[in-house]
Amino acid sequence: MKIYFDGCSWTWGAELENREDRFSKLIADHYNAEECNYSECCSSNNRIVRRLLDTDISSYDKVFIQMTLPSRTEYYDGEVWKQVNLGVYAPKKSIFAGRDIRNVERRRFMKGKKMTDLFSIKSETGEETWGYSYNKDWKDYYRYVYTPELGETYEKMFANIIRSYCGSKLVLTTIGNIGINLDKSKYPRMPDGHPTKEAHRMIYEDIH
C-alpha cells in the first residue's frame, strides 16, 4: 500500500526534532503503508496542484493533501519554479497579503534581517522552494492586485481540481478555508507556529 502526501511545512514536519513524528508517518504506519511525502516548506497551493497533476495517482491507494495559505503563489523563472510568500516577510505593518499575514511571524522572521538578506534555496529534491523575491513586481502584486477575495477564489479552484483528480482516495485538509481545518487553537504550536509532536499525533487521530 502506498499513500501520497503533499502540503507545506506542516506536512513536511517543520520544527520537529524527528520528522518520523510527523502525522504523515503516523498515518502510513497505521495502514502499514509506504509514506510518500512530497511536501515542501513554504509551498504554495499552485505547486501542490502542479505536482499532483504530474502524478499517476492510480499508483497510490490514498491521497492526503494539505492546502496552505491562499496568498502564496509561484512563478517559473525560465529554469526553476520559485515559491512566493512575500507577505510573511513584509517589514512594518503588512499592506501585502491581507488576513493571511500573522504579525508575530513577520516580526520573528524579520528580526535582524533586511529584505535584501532573504534569498532562495534549493530543497532536498533540487527544486527552489523559498522564493522570497523582493522586487517591485511582487511588492506591487501584493499591494495592488492580491486581495483575500482573490486568494479564496483561487483556493476554491485548486480544491475542486484536487477533488476531481483524486476522487474517493482523497482526504483534504488545510490551514486556509477549505476542507478539514488544521489551523485550530487546539493543536499545540512550536515557537515558529508549526505543530508540535503532540499536535501531529492529534492531527493523525483527527484525519486518518
Image: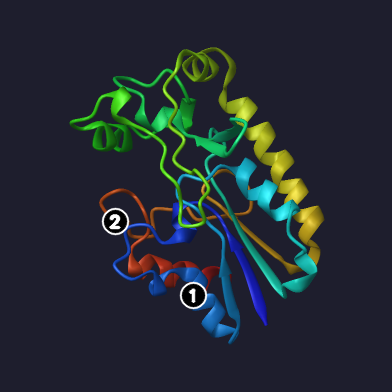
Closest to the observer, 95 or 34: 34
Q: Nearer the viewer, residue 77 or 7?
A: 77
On the picture, is 92 further left or further right than 43? left
Q: Residues within 10 Å of mark 2 (few under 14, many from 20)?
A: some
Along the horizontal axis of the image, is 101 left or right of 177? left
First in sequence: mark 2 or mark 1?
Answer: 1
95 over 158 or under it: above or below: above
In the depicted view, which residue is nearer to us: 134 or 14? 134
Q: CA distance from mark 2 to mark 1?
A: 19 Å
Where is residue 115 shown, x and y percent of the image?
Answer: 31, 24
Helix, strand or loop at label 2? It is: loop
- The image shows residue 16 at horizontal and vertical percentages of 32, 64
- Look at the image and tell me in which quarter the C terminus lies: bottom right
Look at the picture and state if 199 lies above or below 93: below
**What amino acid is labelled 1 in the image?**
Lys
Contact between marks 2 and 1 (CB within 8 A): the answer is no
Q: Give the labeled residue for mark 2.
A: 190
* Residue assigned mark 1: 25
Q: Position of residue 86 (x, y in %)?
A: 44, 29
* Crowd band around label 1 with a 10 angstrom C-alpha radius: few (<14), some (14–19), many (20+): many
Q: Amino acid at mark 2?
A: Met
Q: Residue 85: give x, y in percent of width and height.
A: 47, 34
Residue at x 69% of width, y 72% of height? 62
Q: Residue at x 33, y 31 (%)?
A: 118
